[in-house]
Amino acid sequence: MSLLTDTDLEIMKCYTPQEWQNQNDAQPKIYINPFSPDSLTPIGYDLRVGDSYASASKGEEIIVSIDSPVIIEPGDTSLITTFEEIRMPKNHKFSGIILSKVSQVSKGLSNVSTTIDPDWSGQLLIAVHNHSRESITINFKERFCTVVFFENRSASTQ
């Protein structure tokens, strides 16, 4: 298993569903849309807050916008939709793991680590917990977690 760097992601990224669809095993492609160069890190990509979230305590979907941010109450967990859609390479030889960002951890937030399966295609739903005693606000399109991609030793069968 090998960790992908920013150099690897620059080579593998593609900008259109057609480019992703037409990839071959020799040149696998990762589709991240919309891709932001500012979100690329040395060993991953920072995911941004999308257009909705759900509080575990309230249980209802809440729409997110520039004027309506994510608000996570103390001790609560929220499921946040990512702004980006991700399509993993079609050869099923890559996966990902979602990690917390130190800037968010310093506020009292941590995400519940999750994986991206080799056959994943779509937006992600990331669980974020507020460990602090204060409400924490995360704005629409704010970077809130990092995905780290790996090349698997062999292709998955599922």
Image (tube, rainbow, N blue to C red):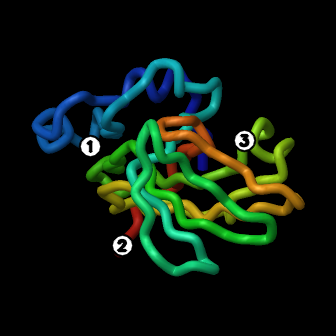
Residue at position x 60%, y 66% from top?
A: 78
Q: Secondary structure at mark 2?
A: loop
Q: How many marks?
A: 3
- Whole-percent x and y of residue 38? 52, 20
Looking at the image, tell me whether mark 3 or mark 1 is earlier in sequence order.
1
User: Which labelled disc corresponds to residue 101?
Assistant: 3
Of 119 and 107, the residue lying toward us: 107
Q: Distance from label 3 to label 1 (Cα)?
A: 32 Å
Which is in the foreground here, disc 3 or disc 2? Answer: 3
Asked if 117 appears above or below 69 in the picture, the reply is below
Q: Secondary structure at mark 1?
A: loop
Residue at position x 57%, y 45% from top?
A: 147
Which is in the foreground here, disc 3 or disc 1? Answer: 3
Q: Distance from label 3 to label 2 (Cα)?
A: 31 Å
User: Which labelled disc corresponds to residue 157?
Assistant: 2
Q: Looking at this view, name the residue that lies furthest to the front.
A: 67
Residue at position x 58%, y 28% from top?
A: 5
Tell me, yes or no, whether the two marked residues, 3 and 2, touch with CB atoms within 8 Å: no
- Whole-percent x and y of residue 145? 62, 45
**In this picture, residue 14 sits left or right of residue 148:** left
- Whole-percent x and y of residue 103? 77, 36
**In this picture, residue 33 sits left or right of residue 104:** left
